[in-house]
Image (cartoon, rainbow, N blue to C red):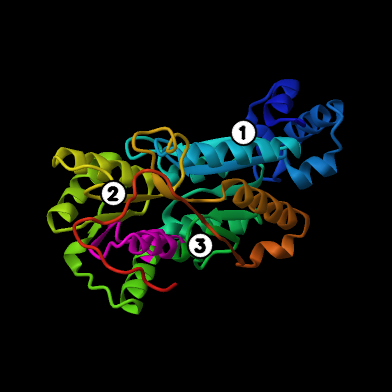
Amino acid sequence: MGTTLADIASKAGVSQASVSRVINAKPGVSEDLRNTVIDAITSLGMPVDKMQRNGTRLIAIVTPNMSNPIFPEFVTEITNLLAQRGFLVIVCSYTPSGTSEDGYLELLQSQPLAGVIFLGGKYDTKDSNLLIYNTLADRGIPAAFVNGAKRDMDGIYVSTDDALAMTIALKHLTDLGHRHIGLLLGDRNHFPSIIKHGAALEFFARHAIEHGDDMTAWTTYGVESGQMAARLLIENGATAIACASDELALGAIKATRSLGLSIPQDVSVTGYDDSPAMSFMTPSLTTVRQPVARICLSTINALMAMMENKTLTSRRDVILFEPELIVRESTGRCIRHSAPAVEP
């Protein structure tokens, strides 16, 4: 796993912050402290020039709170891939009531990072202040942004094709005869939801399917919020609901049942992510699967390339992956309003 910051600090008898200042050539470091840390690095068998070039091979994963099961899946896959390459990983999971994303980035300023991977954050939200990310670019630290739109920031952007994800979900529902399809989306400033919404409107227009504003619900991600928003869609006549996440889909299923209706006989529901356990619930969820393993491997490979060639860190490339429709029990043929299937 390589030498860690804690290993060096313990050997030198100083704090990890002091070790970090020496490795990163920060101002205010005395010659005695510098010599002590360098001696500790040497005694641990790590060449000083490699340590100063690569730090402690430490990579941070910055992620929203992991109540959404897709985030632990990403974290586990990325952590395993990095461990195989000899990197240590620290996971910074922020919550509304805990340390914020900005707070974690401030804390990471003193760490000798080899790279940072973001699984969500301000970058995936419209009109957000992106200045905090510049601190990474200023230090030449490679950054990877997963599942968000390309922004005015250096780094690699790796994502599932959200537009295609919505399109294949709607194609499935219309093939089942549904024409009164509700959209249950996340925050209206969240780029993945914005992209899905745009793709849905294009699909409806292309196939001459009427879709009023009352058939789109924007809400926060979560089962409870999804349940409240889905109830309105059903009351407005939706026979099917295409959701921007599996959590929202679970909320839609709860809303359907609370109204005394059945799934999929009365309302069909599709999710997005294919989170663990979606195949084991009752009814099992039809959803659009993110190719998590492929996304993670591509993200790690891109990060490694940027670490080897620092000129790549200033590029802003986008890598999109094709999602897969997983058909299960939560979708069925429309009984209330039938119509012929549409062409692709």
Side of 13 where 162 appears, left or right: left
Left or right, 281 with respect to 54, comes to left
Looking at numbered disc 2 in the image, what kind of residue is underneath it? Thr
Vertical placement of residue 204 versus 333, above or below: below
Residue 57 visible in the current orientation: yes
Q: Which residue is mark 1?
A: 17
Q: Position of residue 219 (x, y in %)?
A: 25, 52
* SS at circle 1: helix
Label 2 near label 3: C-beta < 8 Å? no
**Image position, residue 27 (x, y; %):** 65, 46
Instruction: Give the left or right position of residue 81, taking residue 106 as reference.
Output: right
Asked which quadrant contains residue 201, the reply is bottom left
Q: Are marks 1 and 2 in contact (CB under 8 Å)?
A: no
- Residue at the image position 18 percent from the left and 57 percent from the top: 336
Q: Which residue is mark 2?
A: 220
Q: In this picture, which residue range is highlighted in magenta?
A: 165-194
Task: Tell me where residue 92 appears, x and y as whole percent.
Answer: 50, 38
- Callout 1: 10 Å neighbours few (<14), some, many (20+)? some
Q: Amino acid at mark 1?
A: Ala
The answer to whether 17 is drawn above or below residue 290 in the figure is above
Instruction: Looking at the image, tell me whether mark 1 or mark 2 is earlier in sequence order.
Output: 1
Q: Residues within 10 Å of mark 2 (few under 14, many from 20)?
A: some
Labels 1 & 3 near each other (Cβ < 8 A): no
Tag 3 or tag 1, which sits nearer the N-term?
1
Residue at (48%, 41%) from the top-left corner?
71
- The CA distance from mark 1 to mark 3 is 41 Å
Of label 3 and label 2, which has the lower sequence position? 3
Circle 3 sits in a helix, a strand or a loop, which is it? loop
Q: Is residue 142 above or below residue 42?
A: below
Real-space Cα separation, disc 3 to disc 2, in angstroms: 21 Å
Determine which of the numbered discs, if any, sits on residue 161 in the image.
Answer: 3
* Residue type indicated by callout 3: Asp
